[in-house]
Amino acid sequence: MHSDGTVERYNACLVAKGFKQPHGLDFDETFIPVVKPATIRLLLSLALARVYLLVYVDDIIVISSSAAAIPNLIGELRSEFSVQDLGLLHYFLGIEVDSRTSGTLLLRQRKYALDLLARAGMLKCSPAHTLMAASECLSSTDGDVLSPDEATRYHNLVGGVQYLTLTRPDLSFVVNKASPSTLLSAFSDADWAGSVEDRRSTGGHAIFYGGNLNAWSARKQATVSRSSTESEYKALANATTEIIWI
């Protein structure tokens, strides 16, 4: 799909007699190269031109410090494989790419966010600064068990939100806002002994590049903290590690 919703091209996958696969043999593994969020690496260097390849199944994004290196690389690939050059990058895996400004790329997920809201039936909902009660105490023993259909729909939505949060957890920001600032900052917090089951604390942090949320985490800490200061220090240490890595 293009970013405007029109069809770019059709893909098809044929599986012949998949039910004949014996368990344990080509059953638990799918040997398809898939990019991981934090594992984009420099793959090769051609003379003085640095080239990056990002591979997802049968799609490849090529970025280079030299304009001449990309056609040369595509030519080399064509000598070994069947390769189709689709030109400048505009839309890839739900990410819109705007290269109108020379030398820069603007990445957005507005269309992906709107599609996700439509799937959840929340397209007409108003944004809220606090999505749930901050004092809510959740337990694994509370609530009703979801039906298989409800569970499948829930898993699909959660997977879509997780993919969206790789670049921007705030859906309303994805749809409506942007920020030109380049200031790198971090915020951390902890809910001391917030779990009613094991008394472990939940720590979290948010890393901002300008006004854009670049990385974030909210998870239960591995050990029980004996004071609120200890739980806050663990959250601060995790945020520091993340911002140094960035």
Image (tube, helix red, strand yellow):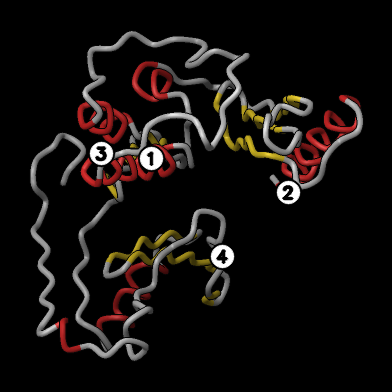
Please say if the residues under marks 4 and 3 sit with CB atoms less than 8 Å apart: no
Report how far apart the C-alphas of labels 4 and 3 lie in the structure.
Answer: 38 Å
Question: Can you tell which mark lies on residue 245?
Answer: 2
Q: Which residue is mark 3?
A: 150
Real-space Cα distance between discs 3 and 1?
Answer: 12 Å
Quadrant assignment, res 54:
bottom left
> Which is in the foreground here, disc 3 or disc 1?
3
The C terminus lies in quadrant: top right
Q: Secondary structure at mark 3?
A: helix
**Which residue in the structure is indicated by mark 4?**
41
Question: Can I make out residue 189 in this image?
Answer: no
- Viewer-nearest of labels 2 and 1? 1
Q: For the residue carrying disc 3, how many other residues have a C-alpha within 10 Å: few (<14), some (14-19), or many (20+)?
A: few
Q: Nearer the viewer, residue 221 or 74?
A: 221
* Residue 100, horizontal then vertical, whole percent: 33, 35
Q: Earlier in the sequence, mark 2 or mark 3?
A: 3
* Residue 72 on image: x %, y %: 36, 75
User: In the image, what residue occupies the spot 37% across and 78% down?
Assistant: 28
Q: CA distance from mark 2 to mark 3?
A: 38 Å
Q: Nearer the viewer, residue 161 or 172?
A: 161
Image quarter for residue 57? bottom left
Question: Number of numbered discs present?
Answer: 4
- 3D distance between C-alphas at marks 2 and 1: 27 Å
Residue 118's disc number: none
Task: Name which residue type carries label 4.
Answer: Arg
Residue at horizontal 73 percent and vertical 24 percent from the top: 191
